[in-house]
Image: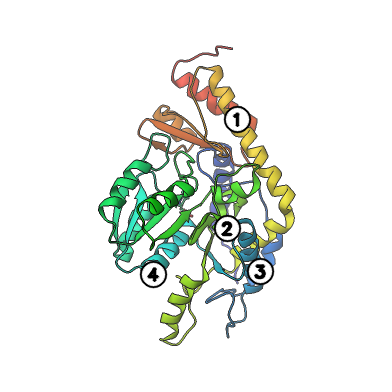
Amino acid sequence: MPPLPPAAAERLDAFLGEMERLSETFIGYPCSQDYDYPEITPFLRFALNNVGDPFADSIYRENTFAFEREVVAFFQKHLRASEDDTWGYITAGGTEGNLYGLYLARERFPDGVVYYSEHTHYSAAKIVRVLGARSIMIRGSDNGEMDYNDLYETLRLYRDVPPIILANIGTTMHGAVDSIPRIREILKDLAITRSYLHADAALSGMLLPWVEDPQPFGFDAGLDSIAVSGHKFIGSPMPCGIALARRTHVDRVARSVEYVGCMDTTIAGSRNALSPLVLWSAIQRRGEDGLRRRVADAIAMADYAIAQFARYGIAAWRHKNSVTVVFPRPTDGVIARWQIAPSRDIAHIITMPHVTRDMVDRLVADTAESLGLTKQS
Ligand SMILES: *Cc1c(COP(=O)(O)O)cnc(C)c1O
């Protein structure tokens, strides 16, 4: 290829400088930024493409299926899914994983109604529209969990329709985990035997496997499918994620597509083949002990942030096993400077592994100053 014209190279240089500057205040979104993957660079020369089912043969051989299968096996192990009974693939992110889970659910129960709490990620509402599924939004508690009484009362009214429940394993705003056992208890109390349970575990699906006392989050808790992001806690320069589902549900859609002549089990046709290499490499390099330490360090940093806010009398808090620190909504200036996502009267920072004490200190001081608060201790 011809080289970049000088003016274009200059633009890229300036862009790099801008990204370096922005990265110093990257504390408001759940994406790790403490990686490099130089081992991936040589593969940028190939037309790699993971089109199709990573567990099936393909005529297109420039793929990374072998690596993708190992990443899927890693998630099966840590999301407590049996390799025999579940199937999975690497998606373009959390949204595609949610779409996949709800697609399988809708194929299982074409007349099913999707239930999700008001604290659910905005992708859920879009997905039910794409699928043309009926849905009912369940009230949320102030702490970010689903209002289980509202779920009970709503399900009670529609007992004749199979429920498809999207549970949050870590809500976007509060890092709250919906109780899978309570949801299942409600189904049991109402004698609802036909149901589907999908978990949106975008961030916490990579935290809970590594803590001492996790909230129920895996297939052993009774899930039918789960979506986890790859670019959030693990960290990846391209968005990616993992979708896992019970094989019986996947076989249902695989069969229906086989009818038109191909074993096409994924949502997208052509799929990113570099993201499996990134995830595989991260898993190899960090290892299980490294990931466990990584999660413990991030939780400790969240506690550090809460303590720093407290020194100014700012009430910040987090859920058990969460790195999402919720605090009162700061001024618009702070929101803009620190790329912080607000929601009504609250905001959050997320202490991903690249977040340092210095970043926390500066954010807290900036927030306090904008509110006219001084240190109390
Ligand atoms: C980030 C996130 C998503 C969406 O993930 P994308 O990778 O942006 O598609 C879905 N649900 C939750 C809870 C999230 O935090």
Q: Where's residue 45, x and y in %?
A: 64, 71
Between marks 2 and 1, how big is the CA–CA gap? 47 Å
**First in residue order: circle 4 vs circle 3:** 3
SS class of the residue under badge 4? helix
Considering the numbered disc 2 on the image, is that residue within a helix, a strand or a loop? helix
Between label 2 and label 1, give the one nearer the viewer. Answer: 1
Q: Name the residue carrying label 2.
A: 6
Residue picked out by circle 4? 108
| Placement of the C terminus among the 4 image quadrants | top right
Check disc 1: other Cα within 10 Å, few if <14, some if 14-19, many if 20+.
some
Within-10-Å neighbours for mark 4: few <14, some 14–19, many 20+: many
Determine whether, in the image, residue 60 is placed left or right of residue 155: right
Question: Is the CB of mark 2 within 8 Å of ligand 1?
Answer: no
Looking at the rendered image, the disc whose residue lies closer to the viewer, 1 or 3, is 1
Q: Which mark's residue is nearer the viewer, 4 or 3?
A: 4
- Report which residue position mark 1 lands on: 303
Give the mark, 2 or 1, whose residue is nearer the N terminus.
Answer: 2
| x 33%, y 54%: residue | 125
Kindly identify the amino acid type of the residue bearing the numbered disc 3: Phe
Residue 157 image label: none
Name which residue type carries label 1: Asp
Ligand 1 neighbours mark 4 (CB distance < 8 Å): no
Q: Is residue 54 above or below residue 214?
A: below
Amino acid found under the numbered disc labelled 4: Arg
Label 1 – label 3 distance at C-alpha? 36 Å
In the picture, measured across the screen, residue 231 lies left or right of residue 147, that is: right
Give the residue displayed 49% in from the left and 61% down from the top.
225
**Disc 2 and disc 3: Cα gap in Å?**
38 Å
